[in-house]
């Protein structure tokens, strides 16, 4: 059977595109015009500022009220590492350098306080030494007052100075220094009475006791067992405290070297052989001075010898009051430091360590002698004490 041929007709439009009508063509043209117009408007409004910004023309300054981070916050991240290193360096530096507030006091010669000319001359010489404080001795070992005291019942012949305590303190303060005072207490070869009563040692059978034969230079001493002695020395402390001195040093707060006859005969009425009684008597004097200085917040220092302080026995020495370590904390312990030939930084630090072990928690200052050190050794000793924040008193 003969197959019938089928003729395929081809159209000129795509399979996926329908032929539009005339109405749809007109609507499409109108829509296109609208879209183009919108693009022109939006493009002008958005595109132009965008182009100006990209070209740098559209930048405007921030308003003055805009918040800005503080400078420390801006740099904190950048410098945190540097600051950490600086803190560590500061700690090392602080350990290596002494506290600038540690007092460095010069003890003037005893004649310096006798007149304004002598005092001003001594102060002028002290200014080149880098000292912060000036110490003046205002009652010497003889018992003389090196200032014009207003305490009653003091014989005129016992007053050597022409300046009052207040005048002396003011001259020192006006020169830029802190004024400090020093007085000899029980080692007093002149004072015998106060307030009309004897305050020196009295022989049991009558008469004033002397530490040797009078015709061979024997002298009297103040008696700490006598309550009048504490009143006398506290009156002096109060006067100096009220005058403006920041501290008062109590020197030679000690007993004489009694002999056998004193124990058995001349002073048998006093408990001079009893350690506890002697210690109590000494602290009656020191505590009275501390109480007198308290209203003006004046520091009281008890001066002792380094050798006597470290000796096996402290009886009848300047260090005997140190036997009461509890009461000792009510004062500053001023140690006369004299190492002899063994003067240096290491030796001074070892001395400090020994004192700290023996007198834990005790406030300590040191006094250096006028001689016995080379200049280099003296500087090393001073540095050792200053590094330990210990005030240094130099002659």
Image (cartoon, rainbow, N blue to C red):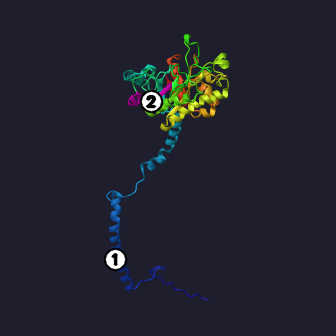
The x and y percentages for residue 43 are 34, 68
Give the residue drawn at x 33%, y 64%.
48
Residue 346 picture quarter: top right
- Find the magenta span and give its range: 164-183
Nearest to N terminus: mark 2 or mark 1: 1
**Residue 81 on image: x %, y %:** 51, 43
Count of marks, rendered view: 2
Give the spatial CA distance, label 2 vs label 1. 102 Å
Residue at (50%, 39%) from the top-left corner?
86
Viewer-closest of 274 and 265: 265
Residue sticking out furthest to the bottom: 1
- The mark found on residue 179 in the picture is 2
Query: Is any atom of residue 353 visible in this view?
Result: no
Considering the image in quadrants, where does the N terminus appear? Answer: bottom right
User: Which residue is nearer to you in this view: 334 or 40?
Assistant: 334
The x and y percentages for residue 355 are 61, 28
Residue 200 seen in this snapshot: yes
On residue 234, which mark appears? none
**Percent position (x, y) of residue 125?**
40, 21
Tell whether position 169 is magenta: yes
SS assignment at label 1: helix
Task: State the image quarter where residue 273 is shown.
Answer: top right
Q: Mark 2: which secondary structure?
A: strand
In the displayed structure, does residue 236 sit left or right of residue 258?
Answer: left
**The label number, if any, that marks residue 33 in the structure image:** 1
Q: Residue at x 49, y 42 (%)?
A: 83
Q: Is residue 175 magenta?
A: yes
């Amino acid at each position: 059977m003969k197959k019938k041929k089928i003729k395929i007709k081809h159209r000129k439009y795509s399979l996926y595109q329908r032929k539009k009508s005339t109405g749809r063509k007109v609507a499409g043209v109108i829509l296109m015009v609208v879209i183009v117009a919108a693009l022109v408007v939006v493009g002008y409004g958005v595109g132009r500022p965008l182009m100006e910004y990209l070209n740098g023309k559209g930048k405007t300054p921030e308003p003055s009220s805009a918040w800005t981070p503080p400078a420390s916050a801006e740099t904190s991240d950048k410098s945190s590492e540097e600051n950490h290193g600086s803190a560590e360096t500061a700690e090392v530096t602080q350990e290596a350098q002494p506290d600038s507030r540690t007092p460095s006091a010069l003890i003037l010669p005893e004649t310096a306080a006798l007149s304004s000319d002598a005092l001003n001359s001594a102060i002028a010489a002290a200014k080149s030494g880098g000292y912060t404080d000036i110490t003046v001795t205002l009652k010497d070992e003889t018992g003389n007052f090196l200032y014009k005291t207003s305490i009653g019942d003091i014989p005129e012949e016992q007053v050597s100075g022409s300046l009052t305590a207040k005048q002396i303190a003011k001259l020192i303060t006006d020169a830029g220094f802190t004024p400090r005072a020093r007085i000899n207490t029980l080692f007093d070869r002149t004072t015998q009475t106060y307030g009309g009563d004897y305050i020196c040692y009295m022989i049991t059978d009558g008469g004033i006791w002397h530490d040797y034969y009078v015709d061979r230079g024997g002298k009297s001493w103040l008696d700490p067992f006598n309550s009048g002695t504490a009143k006398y020395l506290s009156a002096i402390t109060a006067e100096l405290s009220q005058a403006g001195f920041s501290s008062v040093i109590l020197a030679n707060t000690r007993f004489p070297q009694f002999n056998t006859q004193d124990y058995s005969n001349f002073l048998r009425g006093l408990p001079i052989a009893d350690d506890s009684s002697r210690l109590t008597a000494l602290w009656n004097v020191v505590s009275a001075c501390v109480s007198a200085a308290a209203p003006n917040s004046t520091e009281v220092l008890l001066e002792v010898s380094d050798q006597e302080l470290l000796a096996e026995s402290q009886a009848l020495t300047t260090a005997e009051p140190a036997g009461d370590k509890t009461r000792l904390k009510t004062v500053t312990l001023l140690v006369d430091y004299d190492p002899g030939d063994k003067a240096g930084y290491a030796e001074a630090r070892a001395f400090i360590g020994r004192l700290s072990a023996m007198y834990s928690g005790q406030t300590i200052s040191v006094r250096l002698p006028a001689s016995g050190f080379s200049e280099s050794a003296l500087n090393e000793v001073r540095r050792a004490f200053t590094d330990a924040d210990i005030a240094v008193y130099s002659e």
